[in-house]
Amino acid sequence: MKTRQALILGALAAAPVAASAQDIAMFGNTPSRNMVSDETGVVSEWDIRSGRNVLWSQPVGSQAYGGPVVANGRVYIGTNNEGRRDPAIEGDRGVVMAFAADTGAFLWQMVHPKLSSGRVNDWPLQGVCSTAFIEGDRIYYVSNEAHIVCLDAFGFSNGNDGPFTDEEDTGEIAGDIIWSYDMIAELDVFPHNLATGSPLIVGDVLYTVTSNGVDEGHVNVPSPFSPDFIALDKNTGELLWESRPVGENILHGAWTNPAYGVIGGRAQVVFPGGNGVVYGLDAATGEVIWEFDCNPKDSEWILGGRGTRNNILSTPVIYNDKVYIGVGQDPEHGEAPGHFWVIDATGTGDVTDTHAVWRRGGEEFYRTMSTAAIADGVLYISSLSGYLHALDPDTGEEFWTYDTFAAVWGSPFVVDGKVFLGDEDGDVVVLRAGRELEVLGEYNLGASVYCTPVVKDGVLYILTRNRIWAFQEGAQSEPT
């Protein structure tokens, strides 16, 4: 154990050097998961009918929730098989697609079969909902089969790489597996409805939730002793450690993502548990450093979302030794009051009663699935009800609120002095970043926007429910 811990500590210490030598992309841009980019020259308006400022667009499946992420001159997204890029592959599947970042040319796809257990573990037509982590020539994500998968970024175009050499599909547009870790077979986890989550890599260590959840009756936890959170060797897929602080207290499922930061001189990985509690773990060992219950003491969980206790569908953001996180529920459970918390992450043990910096709750803040963006003294956070709040990150003071008049699943994204936010009606609003509300424009993309926009090399990429778009200042595509 000491030898393994020493290896992990060495990998974490070397992380900044490794990161600078690789092209890296992930959900939230950095391990802190703050939805902010330092890119410049980003487009603020476009017209998809005339093609003005549209670099390219491509159809994907009929539902798309994974990504986009951009690295190596490629764009990667998660979707289903309704796009039928390979006519020989029929039926419902989980799919990861790769496109050329400059032209939109389709390059390859990785296709996963559905779990035989059906919708209790693998909901129909949802595809791969995990946003991938990209590092150099490797892609890491969680498949609909509850496999943590490492792929070659170039597919089979550069041959069959890695020790995993028995893929069924080795055609020109097929994905190339380097390694795959089956969480159901190895850990006996029970994903509720779907396995997902965006893995996080620091040094040579991959961190992810296991998506362990309740059964179809929404009461029993079939695998209460299975881990909630794990660390793997990114090179081999070997399990390094596991953590199980939630156990049988899971409310519904666990589908969100970890964040990483050095807090008070100690490397921590922070993840939301399926019980509505946020945990700070020692990044080298998985030991629980602190925990914080994101629900009031008198809250109650009631099936179907009618109660006042919420689980967590957002990703924690680490900023100035604090954790920023909101609570919510499955969108099918509807709108209701929620909470947004700012937690002092320097404590130890149960810090629920001692380390809340500030909170917005009740009618001031509704249930959310969104992740925060903090830039230039302003915190941006949206709710499922469609409100985008601009707040003081230190005090919670409200600067302004913008109403999209539609449900919001994704997160606000801050780049080049602008805030981008998509909604379920297919609209993307562009606002000027800052303490004064100024709308620069609103543009409809023809289908729901459930994911968060990203920018790479000045190009804005937005994934709708069924299409990936690339926008660039001065670009001109064919009119539609």
Image: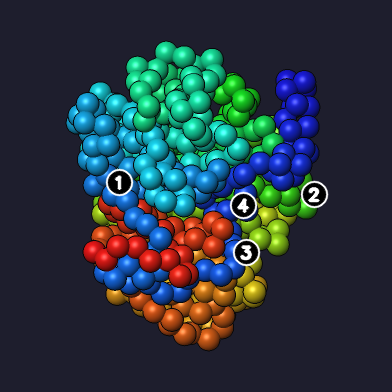
Marks 2 and 3 in Cβ contact (< 8 Å): no
Res. 30 mark: 4
- Which disc, if any, is residue 60? 1
User: For the residue labelled by badge 2, is the local secondary structure a helix, a strand or a loop?
Assistant: loop
What amino acid is at disc 1? Val
Disc 1 crowd rating (10 Å Cα; few below 14, some 14-19, many 20+) is many
In the rendered image, the vertical position of residue 147 relative to residue 141, given as above or below: above
Tell me how far mark 3 sits from mark 4, CA to CA.
Answer: 11 Å
Identify the amino acid type marked 4.
Thr
Answer few, some or many: residues within 10 Å of disc 4's Cα (few below 14, many 20 plus, some between 14 and 19): some
Q: Name the residue under label 2.
A: 265
Q: Distance between the residues labelled 3 and 1?
A: 28 Å
Comparing marks 2 and 3, which lies closer to the viewer?
Answer: 3
Q: Contact, CB < 8 Å: mark 1 with mark 4?
A: no
Task: Report the mark closest to the observer, 2 or 4.
Answer: 4
Q: Which mark is residue 38?
A: 3
